[in-house]
Amino acid sequence: CIYPSIMVMAAHATDIGYASAAGLVMTAIYATNIVASTPMGGVIEKLGNRKVLTACLVLFIAGLALLAMPSLPLALLFAAACIVGVNFALIQIPVPLLTKEIFGLRDFPKIQSYLFTTTVLGCTISLPLFNMGYDTVGSYQPMFMITIPLVVATIVFLFVCTGKIKKA
């Protein structure tokens, strides 16, 4: 869900009338990713991985809702870009840690490689779907709205799959 949101942000900014800001929107995503990634490990240690993942995914839903707004002010476009940037850090830090937490160190390399492959496969499928949606309706906004239930399902899946984890 996160990758196609990143990949279409410049096109979306252009499409909603902010062509001159498209590059800055992308910069906001990656700069926020750097800023969010740096302390994320410490935040996870203090709050717990599931809480951090849930908070970020709920924030991502808010960002998607902003991106789906029919008349999005430039400041809110940048806010949504920053939210997407924070969530890009999820793939890099909390998800691998959660994999280790669930499956242990012994199986971590194998399971994480499968998860990474699944992520790439998801990108391979989702980005063309986003663009097909754009070609069909002339806007990325419905695709952002369609993504929201997928993120909600991810949160539910997170709780179902991690409900039995006990700290050592």
Image (cartoon, helix red, strand yellow):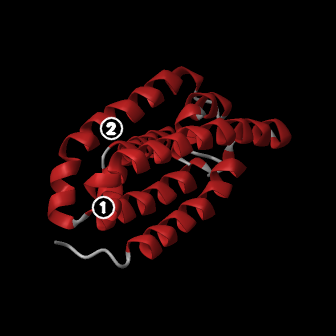
Q: Which element is circle 1 on?
A: helix
> What amino acid is labelled 2 in the image?
Thr
Q: How many numbered discs, if any?
A: 2
Residue 61, image x, y percentages: 51, 59
State if disc 1 and disc 2 touch (CB < 8 Å). Answer: no
Residue 145, image x, y percentages: 65, 56
Q: Residues within 10 Å of mark 1 (few under 14, many from 20)?
A: some
Residue 138 position by quadrant: top right
Which quadrant, please, contains the C terminus? bottom left
Is residue 56 shown left or right of residue 168?
A: right
Name the residue beneath numbered marker 2.
32
Q: Is residue 111 above or below residue 168?
A: above
Residue occupying image coordinates x 35% and y 53%? 107
Q: Residues within 10 Å of mark 2 (few under 14, many from 20)?
A: many
Residue occupying image coordinates x 73% and y 35%? 131
Residue 52, image x, y percentages: 30, 61
Residue 159 position by quadrant: bottom left
> What amino acid is labelled 1 in the image?
Val
Residue occupying image coordinates x 15% and y 52%? 42
Residue occupying image coordinates x 67% and y 31%? 15
Name the residue beneath numbered marker 1.
52
Name the residue nearer the viewer: 113 or 74: 113
Is residue 85 shown left or right of residue 47?
A: right
- Which numbered disc, 2 or 1, marks the residue that appears first in the sequence? 2
In the rendered image, the residue lying farthest to the right is 136
Q: Which label is found at residue 18?
A: none
